[in-house]
Image (spheres, rainbow, N blue to C red):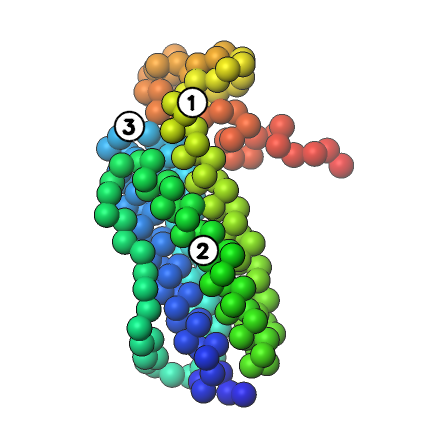
Amino acid sequence: MNLSDSETKINLLRAFAGESQARNRYEFAAGAAKKDKLPCIQQVFLYTAGQEKEHAEIFFNHLKKAGQANVNLGGADYPVDLQDDMLTLLKNAHHNEYEEYESAYPAFAKKAKEEGFSAVAQSFEQIAGIEKTHGDRFALFADLLERKSLFVSDVKTGWICLNCGYVFEGTQAPQVCPVCSHEQGYFVRLELSPWYPGNFKKG
């Protein structure tokens, strides 16, 4: 089957549109997090937004092989965040990522296989797995925020300032970083910081 005559072409456009919109929603959410003085969550949204851009590009590159300048998408539903409170934004993001992981992309992959587009199917399958990681990340921060544990721990733990890298040991992140004077919102549990050596097994 030719990609230009396939349902997979439409699914690729849906995925491209969805990933592109997710990137923008997460950048908007990052702005809301900044206003709430939560740079740690702001960076979570921006980090994920960058990955959504890459997903959109992968789907777009597949789509270009259809050789059509315009593709009619038809009826499609896309989420809109009606509230700007951080807990709702995190929960919505978790829900939307899991919808792609559990239903949308597996269905798109199945159709791509049926139509003979194995490379496209592989992209849908691989990116579905990544969306689960995104969903789990948002769920984790939503849970911490909801339990009022974003900057407080039941046990002594490490906290790292995402601005300067200062590490503090205790049950609560400092109100102000003693090194760079940035507010508490810049702190995150050390094990949740990007590239924390303790997250990697030696070998």
User: Residue at label 1?
Assistant: 149
Q: Quadrant of the C terminus?
A: top right
Amino acid type at circle 1 is Ser
Upstream in the sequence, badge 1 or badge 3?
3
Judge the density around disc 3: few (<14), some (14-19), many (≥20) Cα neighbours within 10 Å.
some
Q: Which residue does the image show at 50% across and 69% down from the upper left?
A: 108
Residues 161 and 111: in front is 111
Residue reaching furthest right?
A: 203
Q: Secondary structure at mark 3?
A: loop
Amino acid type at circle 3 is Lys
Mark 1 or 3, which is nearer the eye?
1
Q: Are marks 3 and 2 in contact (CB under 8 Å)?
A: no
Can see residue 32? yes
Upstream in the sequence, badge 3 or badge 2?
3
Identify whether 97 is placed above or below 103.
Answer: above
User: Residue at label 3?
Assistant: 37
